[in-house]
Amino acid sequence: MTGGAPGQDDPAARPIVALHGIRKTYNVGTPIETEVLHGIDLRLARGEFAAMIGPSGSGKSTLLNLIGLLERPTAGEYRLQGVRIDTLSDDALTAARLSTLGFVFQFHHLVPAFDALENVAMPALIRHGRIDARARARAAALLDAVGLSGAAGKRPSQLSGGMQQRVAIARALMHEPPLVLADEPTGNLDTASANAIFELMRAFNRDAGTAFLIVTHDPRIADRCDRVIELVDGRLVRGQHPPADGLRPPGR
Amino acid sequence: MGFEWRVAVRFLLEGRFQSILLVVGVAAGVAVVTYITALINGLQDNTIRRTLGVQPHVTIQPVKDVPLAGRLGTPRVADPAGVLPQAFSIEQPRAQRTRSIDNWAPLVPMLEGLSGVIAVSPAAAGAALAQRGEGSRAIGLIGIELERYDRIARLTARLVAGAPRLGPGEAIIGRELAEDLGVQLGDRFTVALGRDTVESMRAVAIYDVGVRDVNRRNVYVPLRSAQSLLGIPGGVTAIDLAIDDVFAAEDVARRLRARLPYEIESWMQTNSQLLSALDAQTISTRLIRLVVMVVVVLGIASVLVVSVVQKRKEIGILRAMGATRAQMTRVFLLQGAVVGAAGSVAGAGLAWMMVAAFTALVRGADGGPLFAIVIDPMLFAAVAAVATVCGVLAAVAPARRAAQLDPAQAIRL
């Protein structure tokens, strides 16, 4: 049956992400077969700023990878901007990642062989085979926006953790994707840096309308998001639907 | 391919130690292969040139005398028991006497007109004895027309003394024969054939073709003198040919055999043992080259596989950002190609130095380089191309592994 929750009439309000009955099982067909996600229904609206929380092992990273087209669901439907994702080929998934999504990881986010500017412009290099003047200008502007204009020529090894994370955010926004996925972006940062990162993401959300889905352990982050999605043992226990009125739910 | 190039070059520069190791490995392989090839080619060219030094490419000779089986006529003795044989055959091969090629004169212009034939030289040759004072030596008496013969065997260029001419009563003899008989320029010696024929000759020139046995044996006299000495007035015992493409000699011989009723031999037949040895050498060299390149390919492949494993996270990040499997494959294939190309340039330089060292250090009996090694630029280009292709081939397995990496796994680990 086609996806869609009740009350889904307005095309402008079409969710970016629509998951219906999503299951993920690892080691299918072996004695150690494990189902990690047990039927997830989730919608993310445009311009949302959502956090995903839950204990370790609850499947947060798996669900994020799935939404991020890095893994395929074992069952269920996934529509990204209205397009059925679970039936696409590997190359088509790769192309969708390039155009529709931005990623910020906790570790290993920058390519050490390239400097900060090249890292930010990497999506352009992948797509066009070169970094032309326009891409270079945009990358420089993004570095500026994250407060790192002086670091353009530096290698990641020459930048602090917080600075690397900021470069990663800039890179995630290079192609102006409608949705940025962040996996523990402030995980190994001190409070001040974590705060700065958060404010940065918030600012982009506000100014550019980019939706953010942030997986985090940090209650400081979660509390300041518009929606909190809680995952426990592979099931959503809270926050399945976008807030109808765009207001933040009562804090917890 | 801009993305692939930039990433490939950066990855190579970043893993500097491994990249240098790879390039050195390829360079060593390329140097060995190039050097061996040039060395063996030089050696074989030299050997063939020496062999062909005084040999014609194709020789036409009269057919050998062959004993025929015969039949007895009706026996005059009654033979009711059938004891007497009806037919007889001779088991013993016949001794060859000096024979001339029948009707050889029109052959010369005909042969000159054949495509591929550069020169034609009729010769009258036979075994004789050279004597002076107490000494006598067995020689091969060869009657020639000097200008014609020069176009076949370049005798004039090998003279170490005297002037290139062959008038009546004159002879050109080899250096070792001159020493053995105590003959100097201008001295006389006698040539004896069979029981009755003895002639006096004057040595007007001395040659050295670099092969002692030839120097000792061949005595060149004017064609007329040899014809009268050998008892074949107006005849020739062989017609020698020079061909433009030395290695086509057997083909030319084959064509002539189809048309002419004579014994026609190419230099390859005459020297078949040498050629077999050279062939065996060539095959061995090819085998060595193949093994060396296989080792190089395996070396590159193993280092690149390690590199892929080390770069797992970067590959995962790039794939997560939208780089396709094909793009990542090409990144590693390009690394293989770059290593192959760079290694072949370094290897070519190394080979060139090895050849220069050989030419300078390995000396022949006369103090000059033992033989000339010329490195054909085509050889360099061919080896460079092969090395680059080998680099790419070596990178295929690592590249596929890189492409198969699951981004989610790669990033996690």
Image (cartoon, helix red, strand yellow):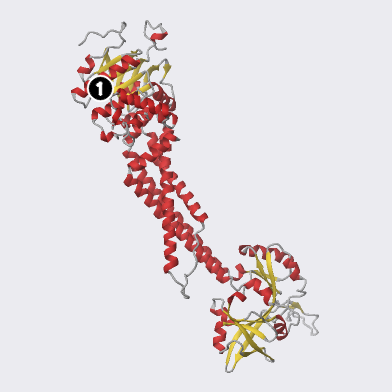
Residue reaching furthest to the left = A191
Instruction: Check disc 1: other Cα within 10 Å, few if <14, some if 14-19, many if 20+.
Output: many
Quadrant in which residue B336 is drawn: top left
In-image side of B171 versus B376 (left or right) = right
Looking at the rendered structure, the secondary structure element under dot 1 is helix
| As drawn, B229 above or below B344 | below
**How many numbered discs sit on the rendered protein?**
1
* Pointer 1 chain: A
In-image side of B98 versus B303 (left or right) = right
| Percent coordinates x, y for residue A95 in the rendering | 42, 25
User: Which residue: 58% across, 88% down?
Assistant: B183
Which residue matches tag 1? Answer: A197
Q: Nearer the viewer, residue B337 or B377?
A: B377
| Percent coordinates x, y for residue B142 in the rendering | 66, 80
| As drawn, B219 above or below A182 | below
Residue A200 visible in the shown view: yes
Q: Amino acid at mark 1?
A: Ile
Q: Nearer the viewer, residue B325 or A136?
A: A136
In-image side of B326 versus B177 (left or right) = left
| Percent coordinates x, y for residue B44 in the rendering | 52, 65
| Percent coordinates x, y for residue A249 in the rendering | 25, 8
Residue A25 visible in the shown view: no
The N terminus of chain A appears in which quarter of the rendering?
top left
User: Which residue: 66% across, 74% down?
Assistant: B149
The C terminus of chain A appears in which quarter of the rendering?
top left
Q: Nearer the viewer, residue A249 or A39?
A: A249
Residue reaching furthest to the bottom = B134
